[in-house]
Amino acid sequence: MNKTAVILIVISITLLTSGCGNRMWESTKETTSETYDFMFDTAPTARSYHDTASIPIIEINYRAADVIYSNVGKFELSKHSAIFVHPFVNQNDPSDKSIFGPVTMEQVSDRLVQRGVLITAGEPNETDYEYAKDINLNDYRTMNQNKLDKLPPRAAILSGSYVIGDNYIYMSAKVTRLVDSAVISGHNWTLPISDNVRQMLPQLKLDDGLEPTVKTKFD
C-alpha cells in the first residue's frame, strides 16, 4: 500500500470518528436534559424547565396579559372603562415588599395598554363603585357595543398574587368590575425561578459562598 493511500484512509477514519462523537454528544445532551426534568419533577406540561427558563419573564407576562385581555367579555367593559392596578402580592406573606410584585404588575399592565386598555393610576373614586343616576345593570345587558360605549363606563381593577415554589412562581391575576364585584377575567401561569427572578426576591437570593463541611484547620 502506497503512502498516499495510507494518508487517505487515516483522514477518512478521523472524519468518521468525529461525526460519531458529535452525534453521541448531542444525543447525550438531550437525554441528560430530559432525565433532569424527570428525576426532579421540574418539567411543566407545556415545555421543559430548561426551555422555559431561557425565556425572559417579560415575554411570559406579556402572554399572560394577552390571555387576560382576550378573556374579558365583549360587553363586560367599554373601551372607555378605566382599569386600576394593584401590585401583585405574595399570597403566603402579604407583608412581602419585594420589587417582584410591582414589576410583574407593570409588565402585565403595560401589555394591556398596548392592547388599548385604559390603565389608570391611583385609587378608584367612590363613584366608581356605583351606577350612574338612572342607570342599572339591565341597561348594559340590553345594549349592543355601539350603544354600550355611550353609557357611563364601568371601572375595574387588576389585581394578582403569587406563590413561591421550588422551581416556579405560581402567578394568578384577575380583573374585577367595581360596580358589582364581578370577576370578568382571570388567568394563572408560572414563572421559572431564574437568577433574574432571585434578584427581585431577596428571600431567594443565593448565598455568596458555602460553609465547608470538613475541618480546614486544626487548633
Image (spheres, rainbow, N blue to C red):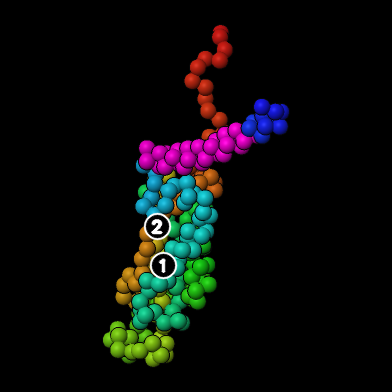
Residue 214, which numbered label?
A: none
Front residue (pair 95, 91): 91
Q: Quadrant of residue 151?
A: bottom left
- Work out whether 130 lies above or below 43: below
Residue type, numbered disc 1: Val
Which corner quadrant holds the N terminus? top right
Alpha carbon separation for disc pair 1 and 2: 10 Å
Q: Is residue 35 magenta?
A: yes
Which residue is found at the position 45% from the left and 66% from the top?
65
Residue that mark 1 sits on: 67
* Horizontal and vertical percent position of residue 195: 53, 45
Range shown magenta: 11-40
Relative placement, left or right, of 22 versus 64 is right
* Horizontal and vertical percent position of residue 59: 51, 60
Which residue is found at the position 56% from the left and 30% from the top?
209
| SS at mark 2 in the image | strand
Q: Main secondary structure of the magenta part?
A: helix
Which residue is found at the position 45% from the left and 73% from the top?
83
| SS at mark 1 in the image | helix
Residue that mark 2 sits on: 189
Q: Residues within 10 Å of mark 1 (few under 14, many from 20)?
A: some
Look at the numbered discs 1 and 2 and tell me whether their residues touch, using CB distance below 8 Å: yes
